[in-house]
Amino acid sequence: MNVELVVDAKATLGEGPSWDDRHQLLYWVDIEEGHVLAYDPFNQTNTKLPVNERVGFVVPTQHDDKGVVGLQSGLYFLNWDTGVLEFIDDPEHHLPNNRFNDGKCDPAGRLWVGTMDLDAKQGAASLYCVQPNHQITKKVNHVTISNGMAWSMDHSYMYYIDTPTKQVIRFNYDKDSGAIDQPTVVITIPNDSGSPDGMTIDEEGMLWIAYFHGGGVARWNPETGEQLAFIDVPAVNVTSCTFGGEDLDELYITTASKETSSEELQTYPNAGGLFKVKPGVKGAPTYQFNG
């Protein structure tokens, strides 16, 4: 399977890809450098918006001119044209050593955001849900590194990764209320595969999971707990993935140069780049925040 380098960004910690279907743009971030990035596949340009602090994720909104970002100091709207930030809220203002990590919107347009301690202190983080009216509710506590999220195509399940557990948890999910319950382990990642990071889902209900320290992206069946396929990516630290393109048949993959040795960088000089592959299946859309 041909994995194509589309941006040789050499990002320190490339992460958080989301596809903006209206503008046909791939948004992503470099967490440690404080950059929000927008890749235009038609023009093959990668626009950089500095936000001057760690940024865990970026997601599109119903507004043409802005998205939502999770910074270390809280949640903000970001104006694409001016770079101006508009504060929304910070549910962890009392935890200055925590930052936002992965964030995604559910099929109803709510924003789900997770945190982590800068030193990855065990159990110091949480997962939150932000309603369109900006009301924030804590959904999962005692999390260590809140990471990948996905919703089943029939909207009955939510899948979730707390990286150090090396597990994917499935919750029963109510689209109308945003309630989740009955957490069940459906996938356990082998110890020698690296750490599960970002995640997305395809139209067949299979999960695609990026492996930090694992050099690729794996496709899993959450019904059987079986790994179905593996895509080698030319980087040691593969961080996340999402489906994009006009037909949602392209898998965009983010990587990091962080925690890559000088010897590994000689083998993988494009670590920190944005990659793309056509895996032969279409994916779920990136949902927008309705706030």
Image (cartoon, rainbow, N blue to C red):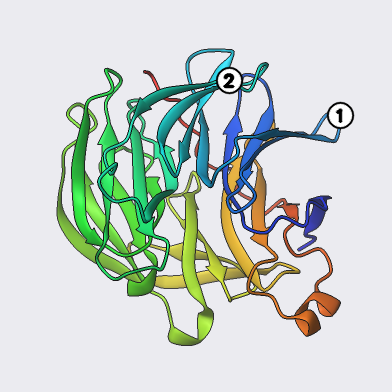
Residue bearing mark 1: 43
* Residue lying at 25% horizontally and 46% vertically, measured from the top left: 94
Q: Is residue 38 above or below residue 84?
A: below
The image position of residue 30, as x and y in percent, is 63, 49
Between 85 and 192, the one lying in front of the other is: 85
Task: Sort mark 2 into few (<14), some (14-19) or many (20+) by Cα contacts within 10 Å.
Answer: some
Relative vertical location of residue 246 with respect to residue 257 in this rendering, above or below? above
Asked if residue 166 can be seen in this view, the reply is: no
Q: Position of residue 269 (x, y in %)?
A: 84, 69
- Image x and y of residue 256, in percent: 66, 62
Three-letter amino acid code at the position of disc 2: Val
The quadrant of the rendering that contains the N terminus is: bottom right
Q: Disc 1 to disc 2, how far (Cα)? A: 25 Å
Residue type at tag 1: Asn
Q: Residues within 10 Å of mark 1 (few under 14, many from 20)?
A: few
Front residue of 115 and 46: 115
User: Residue drawn at (72%, 69%), measured in percent from left and top?
Assistant: 235
Left or right, 28 with reference to 136 = right
The residue located at (55%, 69%) in the rendering is 211
Q: Quadrant of the C terminus?
A: top left
Q: Secondary structure at mark 1?
A: loop
Does 24 sit left or right of 43 as displayed? left
Which circle's residue, 1 or 2, is located before the other in the chain?
1
**Residue, disc 2:** 84
Residue at figure coordinates x 61%, y 44% from the top left: 34
